[in-house]
Each structure stands twice: as C-alpha cells, then as structure tokens.
Image (cartoon, rainbow, N blue to C red):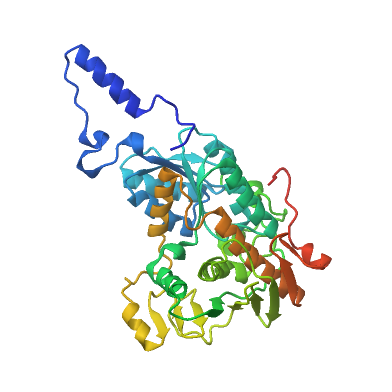
C-alpha cells in the first residue's frame, strides 16, 4: 500500500468506532464484506488503482484488475473524452456504483493520495514519461509495452524506479504464461544441451515519417491534442492518430522489432540468462537482424511469417546442440527429440491473456518484491530491440557495449540512442 495513505483509513475507523460502541453499550452492525468475511477483501486492505490512457488493450488489462478482489479501480485519466467515459461505464457497471472519477491531465490522477498503483496503457510515446511521473508521485506501475521509445528512455526507466523504490511490471505477460515458462525452463534444465541459437518473431522494422493531412481540431474536452502528443513532436491533428492509427509513424512508434520483440526478444533474454545485459553485435539482413551475445549465443530476430511451425503469434524457438523447442500464443509446443514430449504437462493458455501477470503485479505490490518483468528486465530487453532497430535503419553491422550502453566507435549510430522530447516534458 502507498506510504502516502492517510492514517485515518477504514481499519482505524473500525477500531475506533467499535471501541466507542462498546463504551456506550450500543451494538454496532458491520457488513461482513467490510470485515473480509465470505472471502471478500476489506476495503482498507485493497490496492487502489487508477488508469492512464486506457484504450482497447488497456481495457483487457482493466478487466483483469477488476476481477481481483483485493484491487479497487477508482479513476481514469485520458486525453480523449470518449475513452474516459467508456472506462467509467465499465468500472461503474462492475461495482454497481457511479464512483469512478474522470481526469483529463495525468497530474490530476497522480496527485491523489488514495491511489496506490497505476495501469498505464497509452500509446508508446507516453509509456516511459507516464511511468516516471507515476514513480515520482509514489505510485507502483503496470505499464503496457513497448515500455520505451529509445535506449535513453530504457535506462531512465530503470534508474527512476530503482531510485524511488517503486514496483514496476512491464506488460510483457508471456513471462507468466505456462507454455513460454516451460520452454525457458527446458533450456535452463540443460535438456536441449548447450544453447546456441534463439529465434524471436518480430514485425517489419519499417516506419513512415509522413504527416497525415490536418483536420479541424475538436474541443480540448473532447480531445486534448497537445496532451495526447505529450513528449512527442508537434504535428497537426488528424483523428486517425487518436483512433489508433499512430502506429508505424516514427514520432509515435519505434518499429516492428520492438513491437513484438518487447515480448519475444524478452523471452530470449530470459532463456539465455542475460536479463542483465544485451547482445554485443547486430547484423541486419533484409527485414531481420541477427544479434550475438558475449557468450556466443545467436539471437535471430525474424520478421518473416515463413519458417515458423504455425504455433500462434509471437513464436520463439530455442535451439541447443541436443534438441530444440518452439512455442507460440496458441499454447502448443513442438520439440525435438520426441522423448521431450514426456516432459510436457502444461495447460494451454493464450499468450495475450494478462491475468497471471496482473495477479503477480498485485502480489508484488504487497510483498515489495520485484516482478518478473521489472524495470531492469524490461530495460535490457528493450535496449536489445532498440539496438537491432538502429542497425537495421543504418543498414550495417554494429558492435555494442552493454556496460556503456552505446555503440562502439560509431558516432552516427550513437545519435540514435535518444530522441528530442517536447517541452515542457522531462525524463
């Protein structure tokens, strides 16, 4: 629970009121749900949650928070009125009340002392900035991916959450989905032999720098365009952006390697036991990049649909000198040798379902233990995907120093480590 929670919470109230009632010899009737009976969590023990930028994916996360009895969703903030109202309707309908508060500016939500944690599901341009603002306001954060737009943002994210001691969970939910966990465990068990090659499915790394045609700007209450842009460069309003068409526009997006690599490269980092570092070399070829770690393991980031075994979106494949495993969002596996099939006793679960991931986040908010997709883990996997994207953009093999988080002897590549941030925003 937040350190900023006022001491006069419901637990204190109940104790005080009960004592007063006993002194006056007047019976006091308290609903069982308030006391936590019948499996309910008392209100004073619930993790109070607010949301920033809750669109279609964010509403999937929201449903997971609403399904947890020890979480209470109380407020939504969004630059778009329609999206604010959709979330309010969902939340109020779930609780049978009209209590979900509406905010337009993040400061309004983050300054609330009653909120412990924040669900962030804005567009990519806002993820790092919103997370850092939340940490500085004393909030724990569950943030959708990709978590950063640049290597500089990745480093700032890890630094701020470590400095402020807040809990962070990146929305890379495949870390807590059984089939992906099993595939990684198979590597770690040594049953594939020595790991030598990993394959991560990514999307096309291409992007556009074009602007869509300017259209009349709605009222600030309907769409706060300046706030929607946030730290991204200014451009004229077009409703296609706010309807989700911002993807593949360079100012708002970091390309397809990061779009899916935030999941698949992340899983490869985990399998290779390199959550604390990144590959040291990146070789682009076509729409793909092959990265090499200091331990010699290859990571092939493949944008092609061909060559995979049809096991669902976001597939990964781990190859050792004695066997291999491939899995994807269908929850199914392919393994070699066939004897490894006897190892598989894993429930199938869609790789897009974040319910386990949200549950782990809430548990970590209580325990203050790091989540599986914490800020350090997310930072490193995003650095690997960003570095691969830079190599692809420049069209040449690049060497990278993970200790310094910069490219070796390549000023042109190092100019891509960061992007300009629009006033008045600061990391």
- Picture layout, residue 199 above or below residue 10: below
Give the x, y percent position of residue 215. Answer: 67, 57
Left/right placement of residue 72 relative to residue 263 reads: left
Q: Nearer the viewer, residue 4 or 100?
A: 4
Relative to 336, say whether 3 is above or below.
above
- Relative to the observer, which residue lies in front, 426 or 160? 160
The percent coordinates of residue 147 (x first, y second) are 58, 57
Based on the displayed image, in which of its 4 quarters is residue 404 positioned?
bottom right
Side of 245 where 207 appears, left or right:
right
The quarter of the image holding the N terminus is top left
Tell me what residue is drawn at x 38 percent, y 68 percent: 178
Q: Is residue 228 visible?
A: no
Where does the image place residue 131, in percent across and percent down from the top left?
57, 48
Quadrant assignment, res 180: bottom left
Query: Residue at coordinates 19% horizontally, 26% vertically from top-left?
Result: 29
Task: Give me the residue at 69% from left, 82% from top.
Answer: 285
In this picture, residue 340 sits left or right of residue 112: left
* Residue 204, placed above or below residue 146: below
Total count of labels: 0
Up-down relation of residue 90 to residue 344 (above or below): above
Q: What is the x, y in percent for residue 353?
A: 40, 63
Let me know if residue 297 appears in the view: yes
């Amino acid at each position: 629970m937040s350190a900023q929670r006022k001491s006069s919470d419901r637990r204190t109230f109940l104790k005080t009121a009960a004592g007063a009632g006993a002194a006056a010899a007047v019976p006091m009737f308290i609903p069982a749900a308030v006391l936590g009976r019948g499996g309910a969590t008392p209100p004073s023990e619930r993790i109070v949650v607010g949301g920033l930028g809750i669109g279609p994916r964010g509403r999937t996360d929201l449903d997971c928070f609403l399904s947890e009895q020890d979480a209470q969703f109380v407020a939504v903030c969004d630059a778009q009125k329609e999206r604010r109202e959709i979330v309010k309707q969902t939340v109020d309908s779930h609780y049978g009340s009209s209590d979900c508060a509406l905010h337009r500016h993040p400061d309004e939500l983050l300054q609330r002392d009653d909120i412990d944690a924040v669900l962030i599901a804005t567009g990519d341009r806002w993820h790092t900035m919103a997370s850092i603002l939340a940490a500085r306001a004393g909030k724990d954060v569950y943030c959708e991916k990709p978590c950063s737009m640049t290597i500089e943002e990745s480093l700032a994210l890890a630094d701020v959450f470590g400095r402020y001691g807040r809990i962070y969970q990146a929305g890379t939910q495949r870390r807590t989905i059984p089939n992906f966990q099993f595939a990684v465990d198979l590597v770690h068990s040594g049953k594939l032999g020595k790991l030598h090659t990993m394959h991560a499915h990514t999307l096309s790394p291409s992007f556009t720098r074009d602007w869509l045609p300017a259209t009349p700007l709605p009222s600030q209450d309907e769409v706060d365009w300046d706030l929607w842009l946030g730290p991204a460069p200014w451009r004229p309003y077009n409703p296609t952006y706010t309807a989700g068409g911002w993807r593949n526009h360079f100012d708002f997006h970091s390309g397809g390697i990061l779009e899916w690599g935030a999941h698949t490269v992340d899983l490869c980092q985990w399998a290779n036991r390199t959550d604390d570092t990144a590959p040291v070399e990146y070789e682009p070829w076509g729409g793909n990049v092959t990265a090499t770690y200091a331990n010699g393991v290859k990571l092939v980031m493949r944008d092609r649909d061909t060559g995979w075994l049809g096991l669902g979106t976001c597939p990964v494949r781990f190859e050792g000198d004695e066997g291999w495993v491939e899995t994807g969002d269908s929850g199914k596996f392919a393994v070699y040798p066939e004897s490894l099939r006897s190892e598989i006793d894993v429930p199938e679960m869609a790789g897009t379902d974040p319910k386990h991931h949200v549950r782990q986040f809430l548990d970590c908010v209580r325990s203050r233990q790091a989540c599986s997709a914490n800020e350090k883990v997310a930072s490193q996997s995003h650095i690997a995907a960003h570095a691969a994207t830079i190599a692809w953009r420049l069209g040449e093999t690049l060497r990278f120093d993970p200790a310094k988080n910069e490219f070796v002897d390549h000023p042109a590549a190092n100019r891509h480590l960061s992007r300009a941030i629009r006033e008045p925003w600061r990391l």
